[in-house]
Image: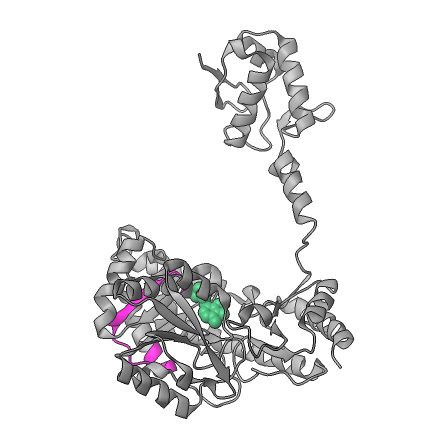
Amino acid sequence: MTHSWSSSSGGKDVHLDWSPGGGRGALAAAIRTAIRDSRWSPGDVVPSTRALAQDLGIARGTVTRVYADLVAEGYLRTSQGAPTRVATAGDRPEAAARRGSQATVPEPRWNLMPGRPSLSMFPAAEWLAAMRRVLQRLPAEVFGYQRPGGVRALHESLARYLARSRGVLADPDRIVVCAGFTQCTALLSQVLLARGEHEIAFEDPSLPQFRRIAEAAGLRLTGVPVDGQGLRVSALDSPAVVVTAAHQYPLGVPLAPSRRTELTRWASRTGGLVVEDDYDGEFRFDHQQVGALQALAPERVVYAGTASKTLAPGLRLAWLVLPRALVPEVHAAVAASGAQPPALDQLVLAELLDSGAYDRHVRRCRAEYRVRRERLLAALPVAPQGLAAGLQLLVRVPDEAAALAACRRASIGLEGLGGHWVSRMDRWGGLVIGYAAPQKHAFAGALEALTGALRDVLP
Ligand SMILES: Cc1ncc(COP(=O)(O)O)c(C=O)c1O
């Protein structure tokens, strides 16, 4: 039989799954469950032992002993002269265990993770103002079910923005909005498989997380070497390839003009598909504009952009501009996935793009990152590569394991090049350093920690 008990303190009714036959152990278990399920919330005053004993029809001493056990376990908290309360989450045994396990891997003090923007620069005031305008204009539609693939207003705003800023041949009907390039990769992998293709090529080196997604979807992976001119197109022998043409990740070279032509010719000749991952095309520092590859072959190249570098990765907003033939297949995959970014966020992004606030924000970030890049360049004991664009650069090191260990000792979070290689041949060591990631006030400290750590490991 289950008993309900009604608390007099705070006036809240609290349900306990408890049967009288179970004794002390059962009552303690019922209270633990109520706390874990948040029926008894952290900080709440629990009923007095007298009230609970009366409600449940049991001896007050039983309740007193159960409370004492739960205090010892960290579920309840007592202090002299104050009522007994539910402990806060941080006091609980699971939290203590979690803290214990995390203690072996502390968060690095200095965040130089590559590819991350400075989160403290997120344009919160502009976002809020844009959201207010959207809600004033479109109060009801925002909250209804939306068509998969994104809201029309964002397709139109993106088409204008991508044409003017990246030279993309963008038709709103061919744009699909996704939850990050991460979801784009999963969707395109499914489309390739549905077309009977079983393999996809990635640049070697490249970011491993997208390779893993394609692999998990069921595609075979191959790596295509990258040299000083970008992807070695002559080594390509797959039905599809993902390429970071504007700024190769993580080596930082742009795809040379002759290679761009070669790649689009390869795609036309073989019917192959090129996925252009334009992840940080907005951030170029050398006055040499590198437009999108997609404009050379819009029926063979899928253009992919993301708000993860310009605004914040937590938004999970990215977009594909598709060859016409792929539009229905990608729409079907999006619908089947059931996932899409919230309509309100999409409309706010459209508003930022149309009002010019997005461009102003990107310009502000570019100016900040340019200054950081110059300070980093002046401080580094060796010349890095990949400097012309983006939010990270690459430093070659003779012993990557030793360099990573030195950074760990200095509590610096960054990445080694090692995990980016596809093939075991021709590997060399490097550190991928994200100079946009630190908050503004932490950049100087991060730079000092980095140069100190590198001094020990560079010749
Ligand atoms: C090479 C590359 N492509 C794309 C992305 C963007 O991924 P997402 O849009 O899922 O955040 C990143 C982000 O780290 C990246 O480094």
Camera-side residue of 350 and 397: 397
Q: Is residue 320 left or right of residue 432?
A: left
Camera-side residue of 263 and 370: 263
Measured from the top left, where is residue 69 in percent x and y? 67, 21
Measured from the top left, where is residue 299 in percent x and y? 25, 79
Image quarter hosting the C terminus: bottom right
Q: Residue at point 72% right, 70% down?
A: 402
Measured from the top left, where is residue 346 in percent x and y? 35, 62
Camera-side residue of 261 and 342: 261
Q: Is residue 347 above or below residue 274?
A: above
> For the view shown, which residue lies furthest in the bottom direction?
258
Image quarter hosting the N terminus: top left
Q: Is residue 9 magenta?
A: no
Q: Is residue 321 left or right of residue 367?
A: left
Q: Is residue 326 above or below residue 228?
A: above
Q: Is residue 129 visible?
A: no
Residue 173, quarter of the rendered image = bottom left
Q: Which residues are magenta?
A: 162-180
Camera-side residue of 436 and 51: 436
Q: Residue at point 70% right, 49% down?
A: 103
Q: Is residue 167 magenta?
A: yes
Residue 430, quarter of the rendered image = bottom right
Q: Is residue 361 visible?
A: yes
Q: Residue at point 54% right, 7% down?
A: 57
> For the view shown, which residue lies furthest in the right direction?
456
The colour scheme used to paint the residues is one colour
Measured from the top left, where is residue 94 in percent x and y? 61, 37
